[in-house]
Amino acid sequence: MKRIIFLCLGVILTPTVRAEERSYDIVVYGGTSAAVTTAVQARKLGKTVAIVCPENHLGGLTSSGLGWTDSGKKEAIGGISRDFYHRVWKHYQKPQAWRWQPQAEFGNRNQGGPSARGDGRTMWVFEPHVAEAIFEELIAEHEIPVFRDQWLDRTPLENSAENSQRTVGVVMEGRRIKAIATVDGNTYVARAFVDATYEGDLLAAAGVSFHVGREANSVYDEQWNGIQVGTLHHKHWFNHPVDPYRVAGDPASGLLAGVSAEPPGVKGEGDHRVQAYCFRMCLSKSPENRVAFPKPDGYDADQYALLLRVFDYGWREAFEKFDMMPNYKTDTNNHGPFSTDFIGENYDYPEASYERRAEIVRAHEIYQKGMMYFLANDPRVPAEVQESMNEWGLPTDEFKDNGGWPHQIYVREARRMIGSYVMTEHDCLDSKVTPDSIGMGSYTLDSHNVQRYITPEGFVQNEGDIGVHTPRPYEIALGAILPKRDECENLVVPVCVSSSHIAFGSIRMEPVFMILGHSAATVLHLALERDQAVQEVEYASIRKQLLEDGQVLELEERGANRSRSLPGVVVDDRQAELLGNWQGSSTNPPFVDSGYHHNGKVADSQTRAVYRAELAPGRYEVRLSWSQNANRASNVPVLIQHKDQKTRVSINQKTKPGGDGLFHSLGKFDFGPSAVVEIGTQDTDGYVILDSVQFLPISE
């Protein structure tokens, strides 16, 4: 049999000598951080449980380079997830943990004190091998068997009239999974199952509905889903004109590597494309603990010609996301218009065969290793960048069985279940009440770039990068981890949760996956105790157990001005149409919801914001909020469109809003069924702030 190297999981698929059958209360498929917390909670509640996973290394991205924790509000993290970060803190209190760097030099960075529940201090940055050791410690403490290098058999099930996506690796009886089988013939029987993979292979093989790609905004009445041409939220776009052709100005010469000739599509429409993947490299600056960036087989310097053009216009932010961890190491993430994200090269990964996934992962590895080698060695790279890059290398004490390279590629998004409840941006942005909380998220609505295209003007641009602040920690619904009952009754899904693309952009953080794994095990425990379908379990019982075990299910922020709690109709900056380059911030309170946007002092006719509201016809007082500061503009132009008329006013944002200190009245106006307020920047003399516009009805 040909050996298939699947580098993202660091394993080799080979047949075993003898197939076996094993039986448990719960089988968890996958080796992610969520898989570990699910299994641990199941054991704590007295269930027999096993982890069956393709990986040889437990922990997913948490133990594969993502040591700079993307978490949002730390106080929203509880249960076994929080215990993991407490164990990280305990590890770094040991002198022997500081092999390459004095502890005093690193200090108390990224540490947190005990929560209100008194559950110990935490630390939110860590080395990959430390995370993996903690996961293995948890597994050993609770005597959980782990069967590694076990790949679900995804061979299509012949003559399956019910569901064409079913596979021979999932044995079902009615709407319940009875057993799963792996490619080497092993069988794992259980009363209940968990899909804790990044790809959603088990849920798909069981015939559960899922989605890949971006839904159109119209599907869930969202704003930030679908194609987002012209949305430029972060610094990951081309802010100077860059020619896309191998010979500048000559289309006949062909496109530079990494640029697509396909049109990007229409803003707001759905597509099949998936946000970009990369490896979260752990780099070392310690001379005694690093090796030079290797030149990978298949290296092609032409892949990075576009990066040279970015350097040509003066870009020098190559080190912006070298986030420091203990012992002079980094968690290195994508940053800028051309970086470690291999944009456009992962579209078929979610549903691909194991062999095809291996090819995709290998291509990503060659691209990313090649880029690091290019930056460190190619003479065309700016000298100051190259000199600094050569102070870094791959660590000798991480990923020892993989040459210092992460075991797991960063699968930011693959399949997403369509389950009993679909989380959308409305849940994350606090514009609706989310039912039956089993945990909380709080990170920004975040998507990396999805495609790189040619603009109508003939220049290169990226598309898909989104960053929208959430106004507060939000609840995650029980139904988001449950399939529809008519599809499967004994499966829970804590990773590929039921959510829209843009909601998943916030949910998809490793601490949240661990939270949802903990809660998933609790649901299964109660379902098994009562011999119920997972969809039948009474929420009150789930809630009671979760709270007893330290999960955080609600968290009201003090002093928050929540738009949905304010009178009248409030349109926040998150809901406005932002034209030009606006930057999000929450540095200077007070503000409505999660923060505000500013223009970076760019003053031109293109940089503006349009607020639209649907109103019951009548008379309204229009009010504007901003956070006052001496560096604000004193002459902000505001245009109010009301009942076939336009009124222009100028606002001084150096001063505090009048009245209640949050909103300033722009006047009283008669409106038809719609209203438009536009804030401009042209000829302004400081920072222009976008926060909320409020329409207060006036009783005659």
Image (cartoon, rainbow, N blue to C red):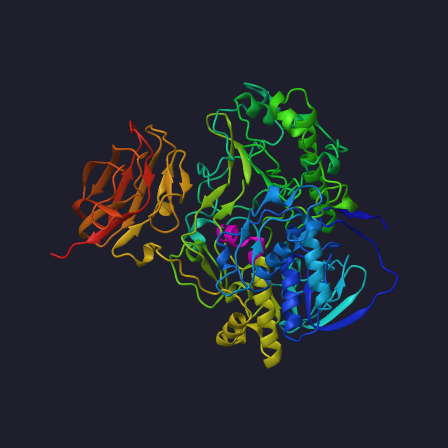
In this view of the protein, can residue 159 be seen by the observer? no
Check if residue 271 falls in the magenta segment. no
Judged from this view, the residue extending furthest toward the bottom is 530
Q: Is residue 246 above or below residue 89?
A: above
Q: Is residue 333 above or below residue 495?
A: above
The residue lying at 41 percent from left, 48 percent from top is 223
By secondary structure, the bulk of the magenta-drawn segment is best described as helix
Image quarter in which the C terminus is found: bottom left
Check if residue 502 falls in the magenta segment. yes
* Quadrant of res 56: bottom right
The residue lying at 79 percent from left, 48 percent from top is 4
310 relative position to 686: left or right: right
Task: Estimate the x, y position of residue 109 in percent, counting from the top left.
Answer: 56, 46
Task: Estimate the x, y position of residue 52 in percent, counting from the top left.
Answer: 73, 62
Task: Estimate the x, y position of residue 244 in percent, counting from the top left.
Answer: 56, 25
Q: Is residue 460 above or below residue 431?
A: above
Judged from this view, the residue extending furthest toward the right is 17
Which residue occupies the foreground of this view, 673 or 598? 598
Task: Estimate the x, y position of residue 619 in percent, counting from the top left.
Answer: 16, 51
The residue lying at 71 percent from left, 61 percent from top is 137
The magenta span reads: 501-512
